[in-house]
Image: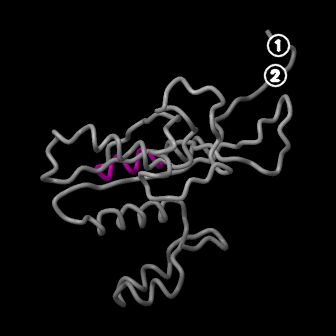
Amino acid sequence: VPATNTVGGEFPLNQLGDLLREEIARAGYTEVLTHGLCSIHDNFTALQCPIKENIAVSLSNPANIEYQVVRTTLLPGLLKTLQHNKSASFSNGFKLFEISDVVVVDKEFVVTETIVGAKNVRKLAAVYAGPTSGFEIIHGLVDRVMTLTEVAPEAEYVATSVKKAQAEEERYRVSKEGWFY
């Protein structure tokens, strides 16, 4: 038994992630958990991004070509999940999401024995695949997440995107000071 009494608690970032997972799942999305390692091709080339080796943390001795770098985005895993589930019915649409950490190079710290020069960043990604473009489906999810995290839209967005009855409702939306999208 330790000599000091302690009180444990959930880390706030993990608590927020758990609450968002529940709400996004209630919106009809399926959560996926994908690998943290991926190939340079999946992380950059397949997404038509320039290869930025100073952003991705690479393994010095990868087991195979599929595990060369630690992912810098969640999209490759979600797209691979869609690719491997082509046989599933897409007639009603296929909605996937993931809330997880990615790893990016951290230039602030010098690489030493204990500091590796990288940091974890928590991200949320969602995809929709179906018979229509589904922009409104993803837009609805973004609006819901922004509402849950108490991030209010900018005045310009409200003025151009909602009707007068809805504008009155938006005016009273609770938001944290300085948080806008």
Please, what is the dominant secondary structure of the magenta stretch? helix
Q: Position of residue 77 (x, y in %)?
A: 41, 42
Colour option used: one colour
Any magenta on residue 3? no
Q: Which amino acid lies under the numbered mark 1 shown in the image of this protein? A: Pro
Question: Which structural element holds mark 2?
Answer: loop
Q: Which amino acid lies under the numbered mark 2 shown in the image of this protein? A: Asn
- Are discs 1 and 2 less than 8 Å apart at CB? yes
Front residue of 113 and 66: 66
The residue stretch that appears in magenta: 20-28
Q: Quadrant of the N terminus?
A: top right
Residue sticking out furthest to the top: 1
Give the vertical position of 7 relative to 86 (above or below): above
Mark 1 nearby-residue class (10 Å; few <14, some 14–19, many ≥20): few
Cα gap from disc 1 to disc 2, whole angstroms: 7 Å
Give the vertical position of 123 relative to 61 (above or below): below
For disc 2, the marked residue is 5
Which residue does the image show at 58% across and 70% down from the upper left? 175
Any magenta on residue 27? yes
Q: Position of residue 122 (x, y in %)?
A: 58, 47
Q: Position of residue 140 (x, y in %)?
A: 35, 65
For disc 1, the marked residue is 2
Can the viewer see residue 134? yes
Which residue does the image show at 46% across and 52% down from the upper left? 45
Front residue of 114 and 141: 114
Q: Which mark is residue 181?
A: none
